[in-house]
Image: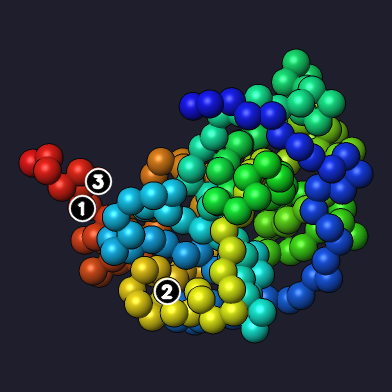
Amino acid sequence: MEKRKIKLEKERIMPHVEELTMESMPYAQIQRGTFLIATPDIESGIFFRGVILICEHNPNGSFGLLLNKSLALELPEEIVNLNALNNPHVGIRAGGPVQTNQMMLLHNSEKIPHQTLKICDEVFLGGDLQFLQDSLSDENGPHINLCFGYAGWASGQLEREFLDGHWFLHPASSKHIFYTSTDKLWQTLLREMGGKYASISMIPEDLTVN
């Protein structure tokens, strides 16, 4: 994969946003803290068998982070010094096809509530450069995903995609965001949903292989 230099803001990687409380969620409701799970109707591209965490959904549109597409990048040392990387819980993800040169932090640290947006229990979005560097150098640091790019939808677009059969919905959890292997996340969620979803999880990626 071609390596790319990443342009980042040093003072703030994710702008301050007001935290809202997430209420109990039926599986058919799209809101912050929802997993979008790609259906077999998505047959190719970055969203093929993708799992997206919805980080905001309102009448103006939606945005989320793709969780199960790993990424190999060359990162600026002033942002991420790999020689000082002591935290074993760091992942680099292709967050989506929009603004792929920008990075957002998805983590389970409750230490900087004034900088972060709570997505669901023990899952937060945001943090400045100091938080990032402290987290990377701490061997007992938080689970943290460096997400490059994001997925975005205009007003009403995501609802139409859902009604057209492109996505399954499931409540998000820190367990699956930080502890489930990225290459097993799509299948694991469908198996947990049971029934027809469990059957879909067993469909091979390449249908020409018997």
> Looking at the rendered structure, which numbered label has been put on residue 205?
3
Q: Residue at x 46, y 56 (%)?
A: 51
Q: Earlier in the sequence, mark 3 or mark 2?
A: 2
Whether pointer 3 and pointer 1 mark residues with C-beta atoms closer than 8 Å, the reply is: yes
**How far apart are the two marked residues, 3 and 1, measured between alpha carbons?**
7 Å
Q: Secondary structure at mark 3?
A: loop
- Give the percent coordinates (x, y) of residue 85: 74, 23
Query: Tag on residue 181?
Result: none
User: Residue 46, percent across and down?
Assistant: 44, 49
- Look at label 2 and name its amino acid: Glu
N-terminal of the pair, mark 1 or mark 2, is: 2
> Residue 27 lies in what quarter of the image?
bottom left
Evaluate whether residue 52 shows in this view.
yes
- Can you see residue 25? no
Pick the residue in front: 190 or 153. 153
Camera-nearest residue between 127 and 58: 58
Crowding at dot 3, Cα within 10 Å, few <14 / some 14-19 / many 20+, comes out as few
- Disc 1 marks which amino acid? Ile
Which element type, helix, strand or loop, lies under badge 2?
Answer: helix
Marks 3/2: CA–CA distance? 22 Å
